[in-house]
Amino acid sequence: GAFAIVCKSTNFPGEIVASRRGSPLLIGIQTSQHILTDDIPALYNTTRLKGIDPLNPFSYLSSEPPMDSPEFQRSSSFSHFSVDDIERHIEYYFASDASAIIEHTNRVIFLEEDDVAAVKQDGSLSIHHVRKSKTVKAERELHTLKMKIQEIMKGSFDYFMQKEIFEQPESIVNTMRGRVNFDEYKVILGGLKEHIPMMRRCRRLILIACGTSYHSALATRQLIEELTELPVVVELSSDFLDRNTPIFRDDVAFFVSQSGETADTLNALRYCKYHGALTVGITNTVGSSISRDTHCGVHINAGPEIGVASTKAYTSQFVALVMFSLIMCDDRVSMQTRRKEIIDGLKQLPVLIKEILKQDQEIKKLAEELYQHKSVIVMGRGFNYATCLEGALKIKELSYLHSEGILSGELKHGPLAMIDNEMPVIMIITKDNVHTKCINALEQVSARSCQPIVICEKDDNEVLQRVSRTLQIPHIVDCLQGILTVILVWLRQTTVIPLQLLSFHIGVLREYDVDCTQHLAAVLRVYDVDCPRHLAKSVTVE
């Protein structure tokens, strides 16, 4: 099974043993003394001992090894980690995520799969691995984190999620920082640079993810197809494994995950590596399993995300995939006009997001109209379909309110039967190649006595004259309207940000009175939008 475990024993006071398999585990190190080395060699069992199962990392504990052969052989001149002071004042912190220990130290070691770490009474740390493997590094590096304690504090906000929504202009800038040259219209992703020629010759691109990360992949699929002219497949990690999907050596597989530890996505990664595909990681966590196990990748630099419902990581993943698509077509003359249009849109994006966030109070008023309903439909198509799915997911996560994201093109194939004057509907309509079709869906919904809330562009009079309740977003290039609709879609995030704010306010407003017959008092109960019930920030089990 999967585990991350730390053990102490009364028989060995002052000593700790820790190990991981499947679940993440890191060791934070705090000391004022000089550290002897930044690399700790892993000690491998080089002798096949009687009664030891090489597949079981703990089987040696029940075996009697020969006296002339130690359980683990040294792999280099340094066998452990320590400091060069006689007093050896050193502290170790064991955690599954760096944000848990950043207030104590910013120096960490990420344990690999099946590592066993041991801390002795003298303060020395040794790391053991049962078998030597070509796929596992011989040393464990001591990393210095760039995270700051202020990044994991609420500051002036009431909730972490609210803070993270308002951090998106900055987080998107950080994702593009040093990577996009707006003056020369150049995009560089250093982690992918050596592999771009191979990607251009590949058979297909496969984007594999779960939950919100899946929606960010879906949101950018249309643009990646347009700019690369390659087949793009978007897969849910769990379904991808259930089907034993055929993978070929000339496939390129992207694994998108905020934490980099999502169990289903990690299993899909190992499956693709086994079949010889080039693997690419898109993560927000330095030192995560996905970032270490993939051939190459992109760190999105969104900063720590504490709220369980992902917000700024989604928009940064979106931008990272947009940047990848821009790199893939930078040598095509026929794509240059489109590339420049998109890069100009990326430059405007942080300013436009700030403009969207100014509608917070207006969005809160709409949330007050919706939070008592039992169901919500979010509808759109084209670039905005993924925004609908993401908006519906956020409403479910934060308010425990049933919501469904629907493709407008499927309206007459069943969902139209649900529409009446009691059903709340949110529609996303932007000026793109499906604008006329979305207007048609709006008329169909209005004909059923429904009064939808429409997210549209400011100067879209064709929509504004048909509806009374709107959330208006500034104009941006079509493929970026989505960041303004998820701030709206590959810049579709423009629309998503209103939906993020809407779902946040519904979650806060969903409160109810509980009659207490004994005391005749009413208890006001408000949902915690940072910690939705039954959900975890990092899903490390299948």
Image (tube, rainbow, N blue to C red):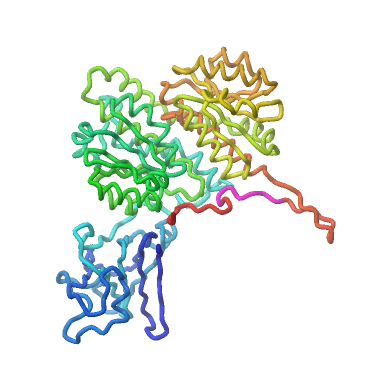
Q: Quadrant of residue 142?
A: bottom left
In the rendered image, the quadrant that contains the C terminus is bottom left
In the rendered image, the quadrant that contains the N terminus is bottom left
Indicate left or right for 38 with 509 as reference: left
The one of 40 and 440 positioned closer to us in this rendering: 440
Residue 369 in the magenta stretch? The answer is no
The one of 324 and 170 positioned closer to us in this rendering: 324
Q: Quadrant of residue 520?
A: bottom right
Q: Going by the picture, which residue comes out furthest to the left? A: 77
Residue 74 in view in this figure? yes
The one of 258 and 241 positioned closer to us in this rendering: 241
Q: Residue at x 37, y 60 (%)?
A: 22
In the depicted structure, whether residue 78 falls above or below residue 499 = below
In the depicted structure, whether residue 350 falls above or below residue 265 = above
Q: Quadrant of residue 237?
A: top left
In the depicted structure, whether residue 539 falls above or below residue 140 = above
Residue 109 in view in this figure? no
Give percent across and percent down for residue 149.
44, 54
Give percent across and percent down for residue 3.
41, 64
In the depicted structure, whether residue 364 falls above or below residue 522 = above
Q: Residue at x 47, y 20 (%)?
A: 475
Indicate left or right for 520 with 145 as reference: right
The magenta span reads 525-531
Give percent across and percent down for residue 258.
41, 46
Indicate left or right for 402 with 171 as reference: right
By secondary structure, the bulk of the magenta-drawn segment is best described as loop
> How many numbered discs?
0
